[in-house]
Image (cartoon, rainbow, N blue to C red):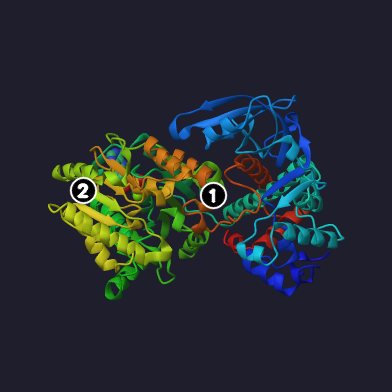
Amino acid sequence: MIDLTARDIKYITGVGPQKAEILQKELQISSLHDLIYYFPYKYVDRSRIYQVSELNGSMPYIQLKGKIIGFETFGEGRQRRLVAHFNDGTGTVDLVWFQSIKYITSRYKLHQEYIVFGRPTVFNGRVNVAHPDIDKPEDLKLTSKGLQPYYNTTERMKRSFLASPALARIIAIALQGITEPLRETLPQWLLSQYHLMPLTEAINTVHFPTSPDALRKAEYRLKFEELFYIQLAILRYAKDRQLRYRGYVFSKVGDHFNTFYSRYLPFELTGAQKRVLKEIRQDVGTGRQMNRLVQGDVGSGKTLVALMSMLLAIDNKFQACMMAPTEILANQHYETICAFLKDMDIRVELLTGSIKGKKRKEIHEGLLNGDIDILVGTHAVIEDTVQFASLGLAVIDEQHRFGVAQRAQLWHKNTYPPHVLVMTATPIPRTLAMTLYGDLDVSIIDELPPGRKPIQTIHQFDNRRESMYQSVRNQIAEGRQVYIVYPLIKESEKIDLKNLEEGYHQICEAFPEAKVCKVHGKMKPVEKDAEMQTFISGESQIMVATTVIEVGVNVPNASVMIIENAERFGLSQLHQLRGRVGRGADQSYCILVTKYQLAEDTRKRLEIMVRTNDGFEIAEADLKLRGPGDLEGTQQSGVAFDLKIADIARDGQLLQYVREIAQAIVDEDPQGVLPKNDTLWAQLNALKKSNVNWASIS
Ligand code: ADP
Ligand code: MG
């Protein structure tokens, strides 16, 4: 069988060394395999006129011929859209415009014949075509070519005669040159059971479809495979771990837990906190190693759940550790935990990169001889030099900076791997959680502690700054504190600092009565901490900052969050920032400041922020608006995310479906020994070798 990954594209007729180099540089295509797995992003069929009756939700760009039988407008203001009902005698389809409504209605006449060109999609159960091209029938030119593939190319490729049609030609030649069938990547039984197109046919069809129907089947097969293998890898890994490692049994709820609960806990747990604690207790009682993700919106009280789980570990003669992504957060956790436990006989220590010398040595010793019960820290905690007497539970706060691979590092700290509890305030839609954290069980804290008033969010244009400052002044006069956040773009830290400095001076001038502190990522940790400390202690009333305050910082007295240039932030980030306020009992406000001119999707983002405080709703919307590749944290998550054909936002159902299939396979063949599954494990290994992201799953 030929190995396509070993075949250099420069030997394909019409490519040669120069074009090969460009393809490599611009699209990372170097082998024949890379090339045929570079899929079109759209298809156009100008070979014929389609009928409305044959349209469905996954079609190429096509032409229709018919008449507009009526116009309708829906929505108000920015939501306004124009719908033209277009009929060709076989049915009616909606043509939709969000812009140029006046122009369209005056330009196109009712009951006159037109050619419409666009891509049909299904929305709310109706087929529609958004922003189509409309021509007179006499302008219609049919080509002899059927479905034409369109490939994404770069400016440099276009300059070097490698625009989409040229690339299509090269791919056609390459495919013709492959005379044997491709090595099938799914087992035969799976193909027939789930009615999947064979690989060779699917690859040929996805580049050069013979019909929309064949295209749909080819895409389905390739998406199925792509999502299926991700799930198989994750579930196989989880099963492996389950077979290989036993977990410590925390059999009893003892003195520490009970004393804390009955004597020192200053409030009643919420129902959700109780439920999640119960789930955790169940896990750690089974003899299996726990791997649980606790998702809860900012302020939902995850830290307390973590703390009580750690008490459970201590009651069973184990140590516990808690890791945060930054020093500031680690500090804050340390202080919170010390405050909660101050009257109990539990030794808590803090370990971060800046703790050195004698103190560090002391901590290392205390961990080894079992004197230290709880260690709070940063990544420093997982360094090899840090050894525990009996680590039983590791809590990881803010998962998205902590990939699967890093979690695995924890396991060398004791005979068995410790139980792992991951906390995240980034609500992740279910479909995405399944891909990102597929090996974790998920608990959700979906209830805020009582007495919190929902944060009021306001969108404000920057020319109304003075009136905004007046409300801020009122808040400060009432003793409240205020955050003002400026965006940070990685590529131009200098400009950002300038923004921040200017903002800082402006604020100092506008609020002579207040003390203003300033925090940004370029400061030395000591300086930064000192500045933050003035805010935490209440000495300063306004904090001017870049997004460094995004995660975790807890100042309940802060009641206003102003986000400057809010148009430059993503939804999840805005939500995270907003979560810094609304932590006390007072009414809190989040003010999103933007310029007046905004792009459509930006306006949508801001509207969602104003409308809802629900992190899950926001995460779903974010996924739909931006696609998963951009979703906060997914890049660092260590899971394969450069999907070639599937789309997590749109293919959620398929993802769920293939996950169930993969789960059944792993359950039936946990050791990976059944001959009928040979192809699966071989393919899984091949994927791991060829893709760094895949390798990090195991
Ligand atoms: P998260 O980590 O989920 O953002 P925290 O654990 O920091 O939230 O909790 C936010 C605040 O709410 C803290 O001040 C905490 O002490 C308080 N808190 C937690 N649980 C409760 C509860 N059940 N009732 C009242 N206040 C609570
Ligand atoms: Mg927290």
Amino acid type shown at disc 1: Pro
Q: Residues within 10 Å of mark 1 (few under 14, many from 20)?
A: many
Q: Residue 516 is drawn in which quadrant?
A: bottom left
How far is disc 1 from disc 2 in space, using C-alphas?
A: 35 Å
- Whether ligand 1 has any atom under 8 Å from the Cβ at mark 1 is answered as no
677 to the left or right of 498: right
Callout 2 secondary element:
strand
Query: Observer-nearest residue: 162 or 517?
Result: 162
Residues 433 and 646: in front is 646
Q: Which residue is mark 2?
A: 481
- Mark 2: C-beta under 8 Å from nearest atom of ligand 1: no
Q: Residues within 10 Å of mark 2 (few under 14, many from 20)?
A: many
Q: Residue 291 location, x and y as percent?
A: 49, 51
Q: Check the image and report above or below for 165 versus 98.
A: below
Quarter of the picture holding the N terminus: bottom right
Residue 156, percent across and down? 62, 66
At a point 36% along the width and 53% down the height, the residue shown is 551
Q: Amino acid at mark 2?
A: Gln
Question: x, y percentage for residue 131?
Answer: 60, 38
Q: Residue furthest right?
A: 179
Task: Give whichever of discs 1 and 2 has the lower sequence position.
Answer: 2
Residue 211 appears in the rendering: yes
Q: Quadrant of residue 263?
A: top left
Q: Which mark is residue 397?
A: none
Q: Residue at x 75, y 40 (%)?
A: 140
Q: What label does residue 628 carry, if any? A: 1
Looking at the image, which residue is at 38% across and 47% down? Answer: 574
Residue 86 rendering spot, x and y as whole percentages: 66, 28
